[in-house]
Image: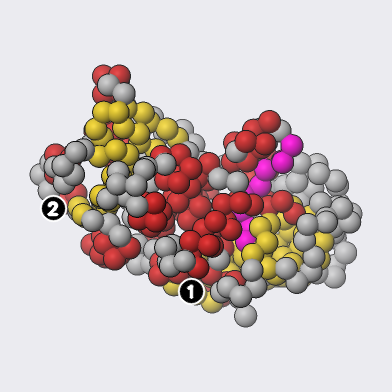
Amino acid sequence: MCSAAAYPGTRTARAAILREEGQPLSVEDVELAELADDEVLVRIAGVGICHTDISAANGMVPLPLPAVLGHEGAGTVEAVGAAVTTLVPGDHVVLSFAYCNECANCKKTPAYCELFAPLNYFGERLDGTVTLRAGEEEVHGNWFGQSSFASLAITSAHNAVKVPDDLPLALLGPLGCGLQTGAGAVMNVLRPERGQSLAVFGLGAVGLAAVMAAKALGCEHIIAVDLNPSRLATAAALGATAVFNPANTKDLVWDVMNAVPNGIDCSLDAVGNNTVIRQALEILRSPGHCVTVGFQGLQHDITIDQGHLLLGRRLSGVIEGDADPQTFVPALIQLYRDGKFPFDRLIETFPFEKINEAIDAAVGGDVVKPVVVFD
C-alpha cells in the first residue's frame, strides 16, 4: 500500500476508542489521515457488533492500544484515492475484511490471504502508518481494514462492496462478516444438496445465518441447538425443523441423531468449545462434514475421536465463509430481496453514543445482532 501524508486536520470523526482491555469504549473525536492512493473514505451509516470485536476488546486477540474496533460497517463513499477506479463519492458500500488482492490465495479465496494477519489485526497500514489520531496521540485503526466504530472509516477500495442504494444501508454491515461467515460456511463449504440435513450448534448471528442459508438451499431437516430459548424460537421461525436445548436433554447427541431418520449429513459449530465441536462431529452420519467457525482464542486445543473421522467424517475450519465479499455479499442481498435471507429480523439498532449498551446486549444474549447507527 502507498504511504500516506500527514494528518491534514480537515477530516474529523466521532469514534469509540478501546483504551484498556476489558473496559468500556470511550467515545471521542479523532482526526483521519490523508487517503493513500488505493483507499476510500466512507461515512458510516451503521456498524454491527461482532463477537470478534468483543473478543479483541477483552484481550483474546493481540491488538496495540489505543485502537478503534468495528468491522461490519456500511456507509456512503465520501472520497477516493488517486488510483481508485471502481468507486466514486456517493456510492453505497458494505465493508468486509482486508486482503491484499494479489497473492495466490486471494485469487481463490481472499479470506486466506497470505497477509491476512497484518492487514486485519495489527492496527496499521502495511507501511507502518496509522489512519487515526486523537489530539497528538496515535490511535490504531485498520481493524479488519476498516475500524468502523467511527462515523468515518478509511478502507481499501477492494474491501468495499458496492450495493444498491434502495436498501436499508445502516443495516447492511453484518453482511460483510458475521452473516457472510455463517451463510458462506453452508453455501460455499458444506454445500448440502436439496433434501439433505444440517445441524447448527450456537444460534448467534453466524448460526442463524447458517439456518437461513440451509433453508434457502432446500435442506429437508435443519436442526438448531442453543441454550437460549429465545434463540431457539428465532431459529424455528427462520426455518429450523427441530430445536434442542442441551440443558433439557440427558443425551444431546442421541436426541439430535434420532431427529433425522437417515442421519445428519453436515453440521456447523458456531461456539468453538471442545464439547460442542465433539458433539457436532458425533451426530454426523458417515460420510459427513462438520465445519467449525466458533472462536475461543487464537490458541485453543480440542480433542476429537480419530476413529470417528476414519469412517469418512470431516472437520474443517472456515474463515469468513470461504467467501469473496465482492460476489458473495451481492448474492446474499439477492436472497434477501427474494425473501429467502431475512437477516434484518436479527437486528436491533442502537445510537452510536450507546455503543457500550449495544455491546452489553450482545454479550448478554439479549440481541442477536446489535447494529450501531449514526445520525
| Magenta stretch bounds | 94-102
Circle 2 crowding by C-alpha within 10 Å: few under 14, some 14–19, many from 20: few
Residue that numbered label 1 is attached to: 349
Residue that numbered label 2 is attached to: 248
Seen in the image, is 63 located left or right of residue 266? right
Magenta residue check for 353: no
Structural distance between the alpha carbons of marks 1 and 2: 32 Å
Residue at horizontal 72%, vertical 41%?
A: 101
For residue 138, the mark is: none
What is the three-letter code of the residue carrying label 1?
Answer: Thr
Q: Where does the image place residue 368, in percent across and percent down from the top left?
A: 39, 63
- Earlier-in-chain disc, 1 versus 2: 2
Question: For this rendering, which residue is in front, 157 or 335?
Answer: 335
Q: Where does the image place residue 131, in percent across and percent down from the top left?
A: 76, 55
Q: Is residue 113 visible?
A: no
Question: For this rendering, which residue is in front, 364 or 48?
Answer: 48
Mark 1 falls on what kind of element? Answer: strand
Q: Where does the image place residue 287, in percent across and percent down from the top left?
A: 30, 28
The colouring scheme, among rainbow, by chain, secondary structure or one colour, is: secondary structure
Residue at horizontal 55%, vertical 45%?
A: 323
Q: Quadrant of residue 14?
A: bottom right
Is the magenta region chiefly helix, strand or loop? loop
